Image (tube, rainbow, N blue to C red):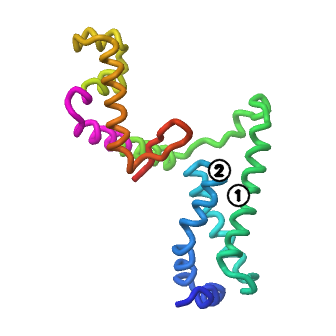
Amino acid sequence: MEEKDLVRASKKGDEEAFASLVKKYRVKVFNLAFSLTRDRDTADDLAQEVFIKAYFALPRFELRSEFGTWLYRIAINHVRDFLRKTSRMRRLSIDEIKESSIPQEDETMKREKEQTEEQRKKVVQRAIQVLPEKHQVILTLRDIQGLSYEEITQILGISPGTVDSRLHRARKLLRKKLAPFLSQKGDNYELQEG
């Protein structure tokens, strides 16, 4: 089915037709939101909100422009509104925000965060396990156990310079192994769900 036919069917309430439009544009809308917010979770939420707005605005869409053009306009306006609101929120001082006004996380959100964190730990642990033993050991002692360089030099019987260079190489190898799960933000790497 062509795009205009999908739009017409969606306007008549065909949810499968609208799902096809979402599938076609979801990556583009997400990328647009991400390029403006630089935050994957926020971009994902905003992209979903854009499609919800588009769905409810669809009866007013008159097919004078391309669907993609119309959708991007909604997306840009929605992201701009979000950025304006969040910049206003940042200007509020911490003292002005009452503790009771901060919503408490519900149990579902807590469980989802715990599950995500557990999955991330497993991915990192598996990646460490395939590294050469000397790199596994140095990463485990420093980054997992939190031991100081002095403690590591005593345990392994190597110089602090060797600890430093071995740790640097081990982290570099680990980043390479985790590359499919990482997204770069500034100079830091953050683990993403894969």
Label 1: which secondary element: helix
**The label number, if any, that marks residue 121 in the structure image:** none
Q: Residue at x 33, y 39 (%)?
A: 124
- Type of the residue with mark 1: Val
Q: Quadrant of residue 155?
A: top left
**The label number, if any, that marks residue 79 in the structure image:** 1
Q: Which secondary structure is most common in the magenta stretch? A: helix
- Disc 2, disc 1: CB below 8 Å? yes
- Type of the residue with mark 2: Thr
On the image, the x and y values in percent for residue 109 come to: 51, 48
For disc 2, the marked residue is 37
Q: Quadrant of residue 140?
A: top left
The answer to whether 194 is drawn above or below residue 21 in the figure is above
| The magenta stretch spans residue 121 | yes
First to last magenta residue range: 120-136
In this rendering, position of residue 63 left or right of residue 128: right
The answer to whether 8 is drawn above or below residue 83 in the figure is below
On the image, the x and y values in percent for residue 133 come to: 20, 30
Please give the count of numbered marks on the rendered protein: 2
Q: Residue at x 63, y 85 (%)?
A: 7
* Residue closest to the eye, 37 or 144: 37
- CA–CA distance between discs 2 and 1? 8 Å
Estimate how packed mark 2 is, as few (under 14), some (14 to 19) or many (20 or more) residues with alpha carbons within 10 Å: some
In this rendering, position of residue 46 left or right of residue 187: right
Give the mark nearer the N terminus: 2 vs 1.
2
On the image, the x and y values in percent for residue 24 come to: 53, 75
Label 2: which secondary element: helix
Estimate how packed mark 1 is, as few (under 14), some (14 to 19) or many (20 or more) residues with alpha carbons within 10 Å: many
On the image, the x and y values in percent for residue 160 come to: 33, 12
In this rendering, position of residue 171 left or right of residue 66: left
* Residue closest to the eye, 88 or 110: 88
